[in-house]
Image (cartoon, helix red, strand yellow):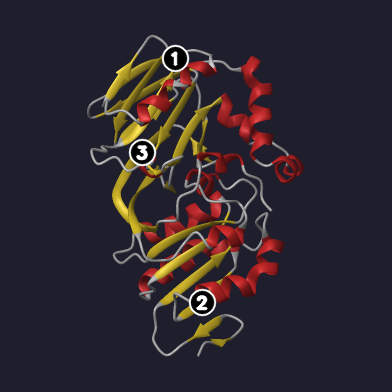
Amino acid sequence: MVKYRERFIVRDSMRKVMLIHNSVAGMEKRFIRQREDILTYLSKYFDAIEIKSEEELSTDCARRACREGFDSVVAIGGDGTLDAVVAGMAEEEFRPKLCFLPGGTFNLICRMMGLPMNLKRALHRYNFEKTVKMHVGKANDRYFSFILSIGVLSEEIHNVSRKDKKTYGALAYAVNVLKALPAIHTKEILVSSKDLEYHGEVGHLAYILNQNYIYFRDGIFNKEDYSGGLLMLTKDKSVLTALPVLATVLAKQKKMERNTYMIARVDDFDFETPESETEFDLDGDLAGKTPVHVQVLREHLDVYLPKKQGLFAFFGKKS
């Protein structure tokens, strides 16, 4: 029999999960309405559920879950909250299994995993059995799960108003990017790694980590010969030059360079903007300024695998 308390649910055996929820994220009211349903569903798989909702303690709570031997951590929040949880777990010797759930205004990480934006439906995509190994990226002192980027396009994403985010979802970001196209300019960037050197004008830089776990229509694409993250540089102002990256994600090339773009698979690398410091973006959140040292902690976290979800979930709205 399961006993419910305000912050803890207890059963005889102790497969413990910590539920970390960002209480000020965009889906707070939805979480409150669905709270009992969420706890009831989790209680089918776990023997103890501890709830933490203090935004400023997300990293500390995740760290404590590691040190106290929790079996799993379920993180509900926007991309900043989810990456804060990853940061709390990244440097610990023991790391619980991790589950991502949408609870913010955009939820890039959850969209990349193909999850629906409805919290309850997203939760029901998990049976908390199968996991996959996920790499963790570190840019200077900040951790990320999927994307590092720099350039006008990533800058414009942060100019979307909260009202437009709530009303139009992912489409609000697309509209803002289209408005910014005439203002796209190149900047001098220096990139260096063990196997790569580049110095020149760049319109946009993107580093995609864990692209072998991003959902396509056939489900998760898990490349067995995966080696390193995917670094893409566009050498002019045209957004169209970024399109070849979609083909390269599905290809086996270690490096591809053309007059207008360069794509390479790398792990650790450095980049800087010699003319002036430039802000960079991690998983949709501003994270600091150049210069940046990027390193990859390979197969560092065990992440629960949701059931298949179509590519078009990326443009889904919260409901």
Q: Secondary structure at mark 2?
A: strand
Q: Nearer the viewer, mark 3 or mark 2?
A: 2
Within 10 Å of disc 3 (Cα), the crowding (few <14, some 14-19, many 20+) is many
Judge from the rendering whether residue 135 lies leftward or rightward of residue 205; answer left or right.
Answer: left
Residue 271 percent across, percent down from the top left: 38, 29
Mark 3 or mark 1: which comes first in sequence?
1
Asked which quadrant contains residue 152, the reply is: top right
Residue 109 percent across, percent down from the top left: 50, 47
Asked which quadrant contains residue 234, the reply is: top left
Query: Which residue, given by chain and number where applicable, does mark 1 sit on?
Result: 235
Q: Nearer the viewer, residue 51 or 294?
A: 51
Judge from the rendering whether residue 28 lies leftward or rightward of residue 52; answer left or right.
Answer: right
> What's the distance in space between the residues labelled 3 and 2, CA to CA?
34 Å
Q: Which mark is residue 5?
A: none
Q: Amino acid at mark 3?
A: Val
Q: Nearer the viewer, mark 3 or mark 1?
A: 1
Q: Amino acid at mark 1?
A: Lys
Residue at 46%, 62% in the rendered image = 126
> What's the distance in space between the residues labelled 3 and 1, CA to CA?
21 Å
Query: Which residue, given by chain and number where applicable, does mark 2 sit on?
Result: 50
Q: How many marks?
A: 3
Within 10 Å of disc 1 (Cα), the crowding (few <14, some 14-19, many 20+) is many
- The relative height of residue 14 versus residue 242 in the rendered view (above or below) is below
Q: Is residue 237 visible?
A: yes
Query: Which residue, given by chain and number where applicable, does mark 3 sit on?
Result: 294
Mark 3 or mark 2: which comes first in sequence?
2
Q: Amino acid at mark 2?
A: Glu
Residue at 54%, 55% in the rendered image = 81
Within 10 Å of disc 2 (Cα), the crowding (few <14, some 14-19, many 20+) is some
Residue at 43%, 47% in the rendered image = 145
Asked which quadrant contains residue 286, the reply is: top right
Q: Nearer the viewer, residue 190 or 163?
A: 163
